[in-house]
Amino acid sequence: MYDSMLDSIYSFARGPMLWAAVLILCAGTVYRIYELYLLTSRKKKRLLPASAAKVSLSPEEQTLDRLARFQQSAFAVHPVMFIVSILFHICLFAAPLLALGHSLEIYRSWGITPPSLPEPLIDGMTVIVLLCGIFFLMRRLVLPRVQAISTLADYVLLACVMAPFLTGFFAYHHIFDYKTVITLHLLAGNILLIVLPFSKIGHMVYFFFVRLFIGSEFGPARGSREWKP
Amino acid sequence: MNTAVIQDMLQQHKKRMKLNLAACAGCSLCAESCFLFELHDHDPRYMPSFKVLNSLGKLYRTHGRSTQEQLQGMAEIVWRTCVLCGRCYCPFGIDIPNMIALARDILRAQGIAGVYPHSIGEPDDAQGE
């Protein structure tokens, strides 16, 4: 009874639910980008030429300027958070996209073999993601500044992100019943793909635009669009 | 108190403000960009994200249906714990000063305006000490 139920959930999660999740992810991401685009307008003409903002600094001033910029950077203010965040995000993307198991699944379905990394390396990345997840959870629970702005949704989202990695780790090491764990892994992965564009994890979409926007506002390459007032 | 006016003002800026509120990952990295946060021994109430989530964020969450006491509480946040210097920085690019300014506009439209403690010779009691 349990086995047949598990089989049907597994087939559903591997088939129609996966397709639906990927479609929702793509459509949601496109919608988010479109929504962002609607909030912009043509940039107004500059009152001063761009050259007016340029200031020539002596070599000593340039050194001081670089030092001041470094002191204000996220790396100097929050070195641990900075390193953990970078490691977390690299492994968060690399582990699922370059996992051998995922490549084999794509090969079985479509006959193409995407690139993959050795299994022990992916296993290590998964452990890094899980450890970073514990770091973020502890930060939310312990630090008063993060506690003050945390809601139940933040913990649920963290669980949504961690679940595919935890179940993937259990499945790879054959901890607990493999069939149950791999079914949970599929379900957790699909749920994450669906939730992605419609939640705070949507910063995955905004990130690139924000970098471009901030760069266009303050960097040498001026943008051609700006936010509506 | 006129809820319809609040709702109308919220509606005018809904798309952009909702996007800003949804994009806040609660990382708290904006904290150090506020000099008042630094001045008040890292009191979380002075964090830019805390101020936004507990003023404009609350107005959007409750669809503008806030009580007079709640609006007074928001006034404390947006006037006493923020001087709107515009120097707060969000790594996700959220325009925090714009959101505080909108919260102030909404409160002003309800006849609630901030009184700066220093301007009338009162001690700054925003720390609650």
Image: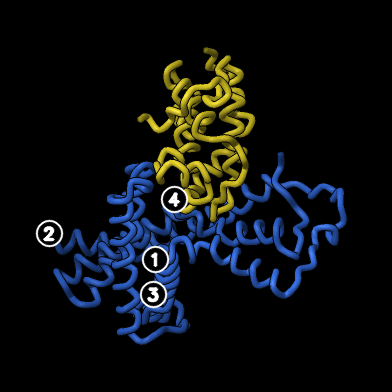
Chain colours: A blue, B yellow
Query: Who's the residue at 28% across and 70% down the image?
Result: A168
Query: Who's the residue at 47% across and 61% down the image?
Result: A77
Which type of secondary structure does the marked residue at label 3 adopt?
Answer: helix
What is the spatial separation of the Cα atoms under label 4 and label 2, in whole angstroms?
Answer: 49 Å
Q: Which quadrant does the C terminus of chain A fall into? A: top right
Numbered tag placed on residue A95 in the rendering: 3
In terms of sequence position, does the residue under pointer 1 or pointer 3 come before the other? 1
Q: Quadrant of residue A64?
A: bottom right
Compared across the picture, whether A168 is left or right of B63 comes to left
Examine the rendered structure and indicate whether residue A151 appears above or below residue B67: below
Q: Are marks 4 and 3 on the same chain?
A: no
What is the spatial separation of the Cα atoms under label 3 and label 2, in whole angstroms?
Answer: 34 Å
Numbered tag placed on residue A80 in the rendering: 1
Examine the rendered structure and indicate whether residue B75 appears above or below residue A29: above
Residue A13's spot in the image, x, y percent? 33, 61
Please give the chain letter of the residue carrying mark 3. A
Query: Do callouts 1 and 2 mark residues in contact (Cβ within 8 Å)?
Result: no
- Count of picture labels: 4
Between A33 and B40, the one nearer to me in the picture: B40
Compared across the picture, whether A95 is left or right of A56 comes to left
Residue B23's spot in the image, x, y percent? 51, 48
Please give the chain letter of the residue carrying mark 4. B
Examine the rendered structure and indicate whether residue B105 appears above or below residue A83: above
Q: Quadrant of residue A78?
A: bottom left
Q: Amino acid at mark 2?
A: Met
Would you name the residue on which mark 4 appears? B28
Which type of secondary structure does the marked residue at label 1 adopt?
Answer: helix
Query: Who's the residue at 75% across and 72% down the image?
Result: A58
Numbered tag placed on residue A1 in the rendering: 2
Q: Amino acid at mark 4?
A: Ser
